[in-house]
Image: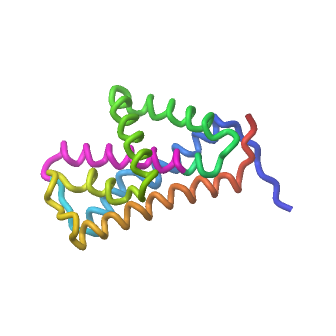
Amino acid sequence: MFFKSKITPDAFADCLVRDHQTIFGMNTLVQICTEFDLHFRDEASSIEAFYELQTFGLYAIADGVRQCCHDLGETIIANLNQRFATISGPNWEVMCRRVAEYEESGNHAPNGGIAAQRIFDRPCGVIQPTSKEAFGLSHVMNTIYLDAVQAVKRLLKQYTIVG
């Protein structure tokens, strides 16, 4: 018989941050850019794209928590947000606003297209919305979102959250 380890919401948030870094880290951005032969015009654009990927990742992880952790979901998300506030520093307010935008648009349709546009279409209008490239990037971002939800589910199979 398999027994789950017990974990606090605070420690669970640490696990979520670890998974976020794995799924939405710089390696992912580089891998997608390589796959689609994309290049940012300068370092500032690259940093902005990475930051947007991180923001989309926070949205995806939090959405996974909302879907899977009904009892302690908001407590876990509050802990997760505290960690990202520390990580993001002065950019936290912008990140919160962007996550809220993803949450709002996610109520109507998958966010992969919006995330792909915000991350990779720099300057705006370079990638045509009806192109194969835009479709492929949208698909990749939706897949990464699903990876984040699956990561939350895997953690819940491993741990029982005690609050």
Question: In the rendered image of this protein, does residue 158 appear above or below residue 81?
Answer: below
Q: Nearer the viewer, residue 1 or 123?
A: 123
Residue 103 rendering spot, x and y as whole percentages:
44, 45
Name which residue lies at 65% across and 46% down. Answer: 69
Residue at the front extreme?
108
Residue 112 rendering spot, x and y as whole percentages:
37, 59
Residue 64 horizontal side relative to residue 41, left or right: right
Query: What is the magenta range?
Result: 41-63
Name which residue lies at 72% across and 49% down. Answer: 159
Q: How many numbered badges does the structure rendering display?
A: 0
Residue 33 rendering spot, x and y as whole percentages:
26, 62
Residue 55 horizontal side relative to residue 148, left or right: left
Quadrant location of residue 86? Answer: top left
Name which residue lies at 37% across and 35% down. Answer: 97
Residue 159 horizontal side relative to residue 128, left or right: right
Quarter of the image where the C terminus is located: top right
Question: In the rendered image of this protein, does residue 135 appear above or below residue 53?
Answer: below
- Let me know if residue 104 is in the magenta part: no
Q: Nearer the viewer, residue 44 or 72?
A: 72
Quarter of the image where the N terminus is located: bottom right
Name which residue lies at 46% across and 51% down. Answer: 107
Model colouring: rainbow
Residue 18 rendering spot, x and y as whole percentages:
52, 46
Residue at the top extreme?
90
Question: In the rendered image of this protein, does residue 50 appear above or below residue 127?
Answer: above
Residue at the bottom extreme?
132
- Let me know if residue 61 is in the magenta part: yes
Task: Tell me which secondary structure the magenta stretch mostly adopts.
Answer: helix
